[in-house]
């Protein structure tokens, strides 16, 4: 949701045509949806997933980089993630970064490979993660509604400037509403399936 949180990024734009206003709104909604899916992947479920480590950053060679740029990640079984550093000399730094993350994981290494067992979630932790998923979803719903508001304002400005007719304005506002509903529906489906994954007991 990077851009949507920035007030400057959501300032109303002016567009020469309705088509451009709609196209701009669609690309911003797609961006909010993909940011949401990325954030959702980082929320733990009872099953191992490499997406879980997306937020982990490692300091290698004096620069901070995402873990997947320093190692190959695998899920050989549902309750284990393995991390194979590209450079074995970085194994301690990588293990330290995983421990320091707020994911509550306990990695171990044999000098070549890091193994991260994914412990089963307690009922309390499951509820916390479901709440977090819904909170993230609400933030992105707000972002999408902000996009709708900006697009509506752009269309109304075209009407005010007599660049479009009342019928065109009505059609464009309907179209923007349909676009918003469709994106929010995708978001709702994603959070529902994430909730099911979190609550699923293996």
Image (cartoon, rainbow, N blue to C red):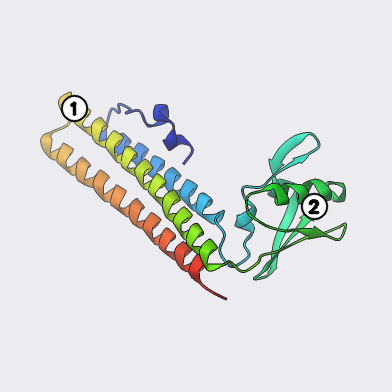
Q: Quadrant of the C terminus?
A: bottom right
Q: Nearer the viewer, residue 78 or 129?
A: 129
* Mark closer to the observer (2, 1): 2
The residue sitting at 61% across, 69% down in the picture is 120
Q: Residue furthest front?
A: 124
Q: Is residue 10 left or right of residue 107?
A: left
List the residue tagged with mark 1. 163
Please tell me whether residue 60 is drawn above or below residue 7 in the rendered image: below
Q: Confirm whether residue 92 shows in the render.
A: yes
Q: Secondary structure at mark 2?
A: strand
- Image x and y of residue 99, in percent: 72, 51
User: Which is more N-terminal, label 1 or label 2?
Assistant: 2
- Label placed on residue 85: 2
Question: On the image, which quarter does residue 166 sit in?
Answer: top left
Q: Confirm whether residue 162 shows in the render.
A: no
| Residue density around tag 1, few if under 14, some if 14–19, many if 20 or more, within 10 Å | some
Question: On the image, which quarter does residue 153 sit in?
Answer: top left
Please tell me whether residue 132 is drawn above or below residue 147 in the rendered image: below
Q: CA distance from mark 2 to mark 1?
A: 58 Å
Q: Residue furthest left?
A: 166
- Label placed on residue 1: none
- Image x and y of residue 101, in percent: 66, 48
- Image x and y of residue 199, in percent: 49, 69
Q: Nearer the viewer, residue 35 or 127?
A: 127
The residue sitting at 57% across, 59% down in the picture is 44
Q: Residue furthest bottom?
A: 202
Q: Secondary structure at mark 1?
A: loop
């Amino acid at each position: 949701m990077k851009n949507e949180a920035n007030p400057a990024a959501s300032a109303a734009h002016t567009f020469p045509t309705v088509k451009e206003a709609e196209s701009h709104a669609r690309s911003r909604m797609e961006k909010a949806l993909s940011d949401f899916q990325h954030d959702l992947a980082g929320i733990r479920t009872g099953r191992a997933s490499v997406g879980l480590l997306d937020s982990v950053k490692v300091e290698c060679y004096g620069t901070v980089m995402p873990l997947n740029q320093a190692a190959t990640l695998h899920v050989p079984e549902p309750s284990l993630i393995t991390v194979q550093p590209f450079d074995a000399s970085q194994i301690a730094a990588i293990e330290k970064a995983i421990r320091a993350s707020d994911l509550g994981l306990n990695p171990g290494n044999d000098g070549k490979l890091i193994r991260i067992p994914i412990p089963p979630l307690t009922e309390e932790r499951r509820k916390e993660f479901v709440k977090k998923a819904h909170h993230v979803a609400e933030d992105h719903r707000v972002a999408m509604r902000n996009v709708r508001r900006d697009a509506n304002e752009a269309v109304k400005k075209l009407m005010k400037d007599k660049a479009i007719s009342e019928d065109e304005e009505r059609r464009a506002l309907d179209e923007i509403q349909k676009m918003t509903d469709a994106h929010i529906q995708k978001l709702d489906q994603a959070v529902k399936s994430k909730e099911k994954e979190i609550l699923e007991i293996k």
